[in-house]
Amino acid sequence: MADEHYQILEFEKPVYELKKKIEDLKHSAKEKNLNVDTEVKALEDKVARLREEIYMNLNPWQIVQIMRHQKRPKTLDYIRMIFTDFMEMHGDRSFGDDKAIIGGTARLNDIPVMLIGIQKGKDTKENILRNFGCGLPEGYRKALRLMKYAEKFHIPVVTFIDTNGAFPGLEGEERGVAEAIARNLLEMSHLKVPIVVTVIGEGGSGGALGIGVGDRVLMLKYATYSVISFEGCASILWSDASKASEAAKILKPTAKDLLELRVIDEIIEEPLEGAHTNPEAVAENLKAAIENNLKELMKTGLEELLEKRYEKFRSMGVYTTAGDPANV
């Protein structure tokens, strides 16, 4: 059974109802001193089959629901489980400190790294503090300051993406959030150190891209990555945010979709029900993937590194021009 701390999603209920039936049967049998091993074994086999059938055939919106699970590990959780000696740095040296975007130096075993990530809250109070994981201009400028620091001292950069988008309010516009994100895209494209990007939750719009340009883009199995939030897309296409599930189908935001489209480079495995059911195991998988990619990138010459990074993003997508013979 899921414990009281776990939010049970709608499509998961048949599994948990069967598990409850097993617990009730065991409890009743114990009280009446009955042997129900055969019945329990049959139900447990049924649970295993149903569990596999559900999770091996998830649709995009069900993946979104797992990704948004209230107990899903956040950036600081992974930093705690993967890295040592994390020293957080604050402020953009221009306006202030954005609590939604965090960063600082740390060590990945024997590799010094610069960590930059988007932090969502775990409850209402923390979400208000963290601006619900929606970065402000000063957050992206802080991220760039830390990247330039990493470049100066030849430290690789590791980023963690978990946001439905940059903050859309007036203060973001007044302080130039679009310019801050655009500047980061430019600067990250030719930053002279290896960059490993990890999408650990929701990767939404420019808010994700502002720290999303890298040599390798890794993505957890139940994370999502899209050009706009699902509710935002539904509001634009159908003037109805409640059609977010329809938007999820057409945006192709899942790790499987994006690996096929070559937007990401590697999928990091999660437990069948999601990272919230075994954060430590996911952290181990993520740690191994980050370390392996960093070690490979650190052996690559700077000129080759930058050329491959340029080609990686330049080759995304398929397009034609008016003068293309294919259009004649």
Image (cartoon, rainbow, N blue to C red):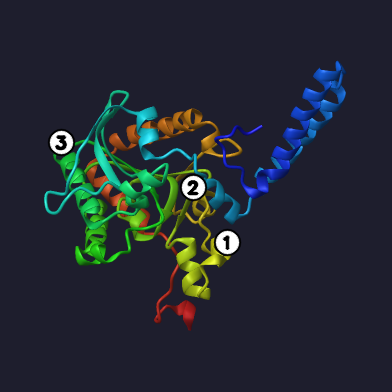
Write the residue at 57% across / 37% down. Answer: 6
Residue lying furthest top in this view?
Answer: 33
Q: Secondary structure at mark 3?
A: loop
Residue lying furthest bottom in this view?
Answer: 328
Disc 3: CA contacts within 10 A as few (<14), some (14-19) or many (>=20):
few
Residue closest to the eye, 42 or 160: 42
Residue lying furthest front in this view?
Answer: 31
Residue kind at label 2, given as amino acid type: Ala
Quadrant containing the N terminus is: top right
Q: Earlier in the sequence, mark 1 or mark 2?
A: 2
Vertical position of residue 265 compared to residue 23: above or below: below
Q: Secondary structure at mark 2?
A: loop
Residue closest to the eye, 138 or 16: 16
Residue kind at label 1, given as amino acid type: Ser
Q: Residue 90, how many percent across, how many down?
A: 19, 42
| Residue bearing mark 2 | 223
Can you see residue 56?
no
| Residue bearing mark 3 | 153
Q: Earlier in the sequence, mark 3 or mark 2?
A: 3
Residue closest to the eye, 149 or 131: 131
Q: Residue 59, how many percent across, how many down?
A: 62, 54
| Residue bearing mark 1 | 245
Q: Quadrant of residue 4?
A: top right
Q: Residue 155, how many percent across, how many down?
A: 22, 36
Disc 2: CA contacts within 10 A as few (<14), some (14-19) or many (>=20):
many
Distance (Cα) linking label 1 and label 3:
45 Å
